[in-house]
Amino acid sequence: MRKIGKMYSEYTSEDIQCHMEPDFRYSSFFVLAEMTSANEYVEYIAGKIQTFKRHNVVIKTKIMHIKGSGKPCLVLDQQGSDIEPGCLTAKRSENGLIARMDIMPCSFYELIP
């Protein structure tokens, strides 16, 4: 979660792929189709990060937990925007790499510190 937060706050995605399974999957409430590979996601997020940087978009991040399950999530909040913050969850594979990430609006969950 900290690496993902750093990616958004420092506008860099260079070292994320080495932490992902090749058949990594990504789904977002805000993106139409599920992505089904690390390569596809890295290409997508690199473009998005560069757009944020070009337009001086500031994304504040903080780690929270989903009440009930205690599962950690990363809250992504676009500063100065009325867009609802996103809640990013991640699932690791048996060998410790990121197998999947999902983003949903924070209002879908009850979050606690």
Image: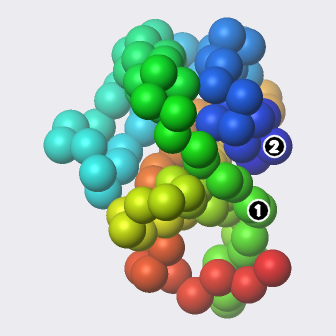
Kind of residue at badge 1: Ile
Distance from disc 1 to disc 2, alpha carbons, whole Å, reads 8 Å
For the residue pair 35 and 47, the one nearer the viewer reads as: 47
- Check disc 2 and report the residue beneath it: 2
* Number of marks in the rendered image: 2
Asked whether residue 87 appears in the rendered view, the answer is yes
Q: Are marks 1 and 2 in contact (CB under 8 Å)?
A: yes
Image point (49%, 73%), residue name: 106
Image point (81%, 79%), residue name: 113
SS category of the residue bearing label 2: helix
Q: Residue 112 placed where, x, y %?
A: 73, 84
- Check disc 1 and report the residue beneath it: 63
Give the mark, 1 or 2, whose residue is nearer the N terminus. Answer: 2
51 with respect to 74 (left or right): left
Image point (42%, 61%), residue name: 81
Does residue 37 lie above or below 65 as drawn?
Answer: above
Kind of residue at badge 2: Arg
Does residue 23 lie above or below 5 as drawn?
Answer: above
Image point (73%, 74%), residue name: 65
